[in-house]
Amino acid sequence: MAKKILIPKNHPRYCSLVIREKLVDGFENGLVAREGLIAHGRGESFDYLLGEKTIYPALKAIDAASALFILAEHPIISINGNTAALCAKEISQLNQSLEKCSIEINLFYHTKTREKLIASELQKYGVKKILGIDSSKKTTIPELESNRRNVDSEGIFKSDVVFIPLEDGDRAIALKKMNKKIITVDLNPLSRTSIASDISIVDNIVRAVPQLIKCVEHHKKNTTKKELKKIISSFNNEESLSDSLNILKSSRMLTKT
Ligand code: PTJ
């Protein structure tokens, strides 16, 4: 295991460097695929342009996502290696906030070992029921070639709302074809996942999930079903992605040079 370096708190990229360390730890502990480190680099470059802040289209998307989650009959959170390394604790809190929700492990670079390690990471934070690990319950998503096609018949397969943070585009498109409502978190507003999803939260997952929990808790206490439906119907993903892209284009990082 590599020797830990001290990241000074006053470093201008402190938060970003702490997130990197979590990914590296996740890789060294076997949760994250090698390719996950590269995928993180892509996300990080967008976050740099966003000024590492949650932008207003993301806040609106989070609001709509929380409403969709609350109204869902069979909501499910699909978790991969990067998500587990960055926010297993917050994902388990979100799962607890949503009474009908379940968590399913779904890996692009699937190995049984990573699956087990991710399951025990979730168990550390109190998740009791984890789907996607019992091979007798596995079924497949039609028209999908990657390992992501293998899903739990009682989880993603029968869900009505699927949360697929940090995902590859093929499965998002395949799940849409199965008439599921898709929520994603993806820092890249141009990704196929962002475009294919019903609600795309263009934000870093480490900021988006805690905000999502806050929103769910708020709406559970204060918002009627009718109001929740209104929040969902007034959200337009295409507009939201276009707003996010405009913010990226006018990034303070770009205007500095
Ligand atoms: O754990 P596995 O085997 O399931 O593999 C997971 C990865 C992430 C490696 C796999 O799904 C993959 O290769 O994903 P992609 O196709 O690289 O897509 C990941 C997307 O997430 C990209 O659009 C990134 O910009 C985005 N992303 C990366 N890190 C973050 C992020 N979005 C939000 N927050 C992040 N921290």
Image (spheres, rainbow, N blue to C red):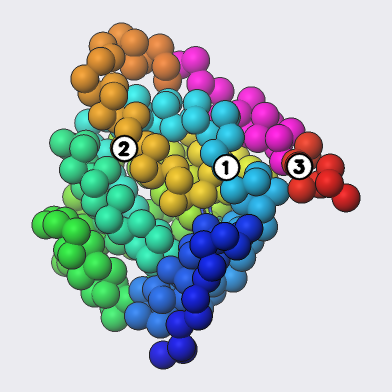
| Secondary structure found at label 2 | helix
Place residue 84 in its image quadrant.
Answer: bottom left
Residue located at (41% from left, 76% from top):
25
Residue located at (58% from left, 35% from top):
55
Q: Residues within 10 Å of mark 1 (few under 14, many from 20)?
A: few
Q: Nearer the viewer, residue 27 or 52?
A: 52
The reply to whether residue 140 is in sight is: no
Residue 250 got which mark?
A: none
Q: Nearer the viewer, residue 214 or 122?
A: 214
Q: Which residue is mark 2?
A: 213
Residue located at (42% from left, 26% from top):
63
Give the residue at the far right of this rendering: 257
Residue 252 got which mark?
A: 3
| Mark 1: amino acid | Lys
Residue located at (57% from left, 60% from top):
10
Magenta range is 233-248
- Is residue 186 highlighted in magenta? no
